[in-house]
Each structure stands twice: as structure tokens, then as C-alpha cells.
Image (cartoon, helix red, strand yellow):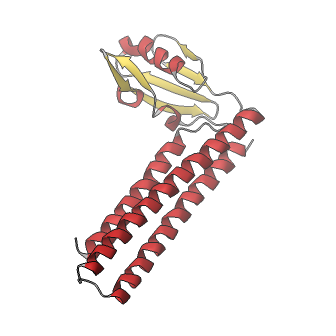
Amino acid sequence: MSVDEVLMDAEERMEKAVARLKNDLTGIRTGRANPGMVDSLKAEVYGSPTPIKQIASVSAPEPQQLVIRPFDPGTIKDIEKGIIASDLGLAPQSDGKVIRLNIPALSGDVRKKMVARTKELSEESKVSIRNVRRDANKALDQLEKDKELSEDECKTYKDDIQELTNKFEGQASELAKTKEAEVLDE
């Protein structure tokens, strides 16, 4: 592996860690309806668990309501069961064509739990980023050991890796801070 490959790989993996955090944070409830809330939900349809977003369109016509419109109306009961079985704590209301989910305002305790979960996800992301840094530094040490890099070059590239780490950890912190503000916003 060349130095450029090590740096590119590290940056790519750190970007993926931040992207995953961004995706995970969309599933955290705020006081507002967000179609991302049901992204991780699955429904037992046609004998296999299927993500709801693959079998229905999800929209938020009002700030406190989600509307799930199945592509096949025959799957509506399965989607309802998936929502009830989830940990969202929402009661689906169906008229046979669409499912409406009313999003209640969050209580103080629930808000605290959501903020704690946000911090937890952010920290997991930062740990992933630091693991990437560790792997990249090991690869650079190996290149130095194999005499492909001088000690000074190795140190310079490790500094570059640290800059990447700081950049992506900052992005993760910023995402978490934004989500916490959304959760705490009345």
C-alpha cells in the first residue's frame, strides 16, 4: 500500500463513519415529524422483513404527522405490525389506503433520552474515526519499517492523518449538536 492509498483509504473510511452517524441521527425522534424516523423500521411482508421505505412512500404533510402510503394496499396490516413492534412508541391509524402516524410532543424525560442517544451515536462515530486513524498510522509505520518512508516523512503523514481525524470528529460533533438542538427545541 502506498502513502496515497493509506491517506485515501483513511479519508474514505472516516467519511463513511460520519455518513453513518448522519443516517443514524435521522432515526432519532424530535418533536417534529420526519420521514427518516421510519427508515430503520422493517415490516414482515411476503415472508421476509423488508424496510418500510422500500414498500411505501413516507411523507410529512404536517409538522406533527407522518403519512405512509403503501405501494401495495395489501401490505398495510404488515406495515402497521412493524410500526407497533418498533421502539418508536407510535400508534398507527389506518383508513385502508394510508397509515397516519401522529407524532406527540416529547416529554422532558424522552428528550433527555434522545439527547443521550445522540451523544452515544456521536461517540461511536468518533471511536470509528479514531480506529481508522490507528489503522492508517500502523500502515505508515509499516512503510517506514520497510524503508519506503523516512522517519520525517512518516511523522508528516501521521500529522496529515491527525488533521483528517480532527476534521471528521468535528463534523460528527457538529451533527450531534445540531440534532440535540432539534430534540430540545420545543
Where 14 sits versus 23, above or below? below
Residue 111, position as x, y percentages in the image:
71, 38
Considering every residue shown, the one lying at the far right of the view is 108
Residue 146, position as x, y percentages in the image:
23, 79
Residue 15, position as x, y percentages in the image:
41, 60
Where 108 sits versus 125, above or below? above
Drawn side of residue 20 relative to residue 91, left or right? left
Along the line of sight, the residue nearer the viewer: 14 or 158: 158
Kindly identify the residue that appears in the image at 31 percent across and 88 percent down.
150
Residue 92, position as x, y percentages in the image:
56, 17
| Quarter of the picture holding the N terminus | bottom left
Along the line of sight, the residue nearer the viewer: 135 or 8: 135
| Quarter of the picture holding the C terminus | top right
Kindly identify the residue that appears in the image at 46 percent across and 28 percent down.
41
Q: Quadrant of residue 61?
A: top right
Drawn side of residue 41 relative to residue 116, left or right? left
How many labels, in total?
0
Kindly identify the residue that appears in the image at 55 percent across and 21 percent down.
100
Where 64 sits versus 75, above or below? below
Drawn side of residue 64 relative to residue 54, left or right? right
Along the line of sight, the residue nearer the viewer: 66 or 145: 145
Kindly identify the residue that appears in the image at 23 percent across and 83 percent down.
148
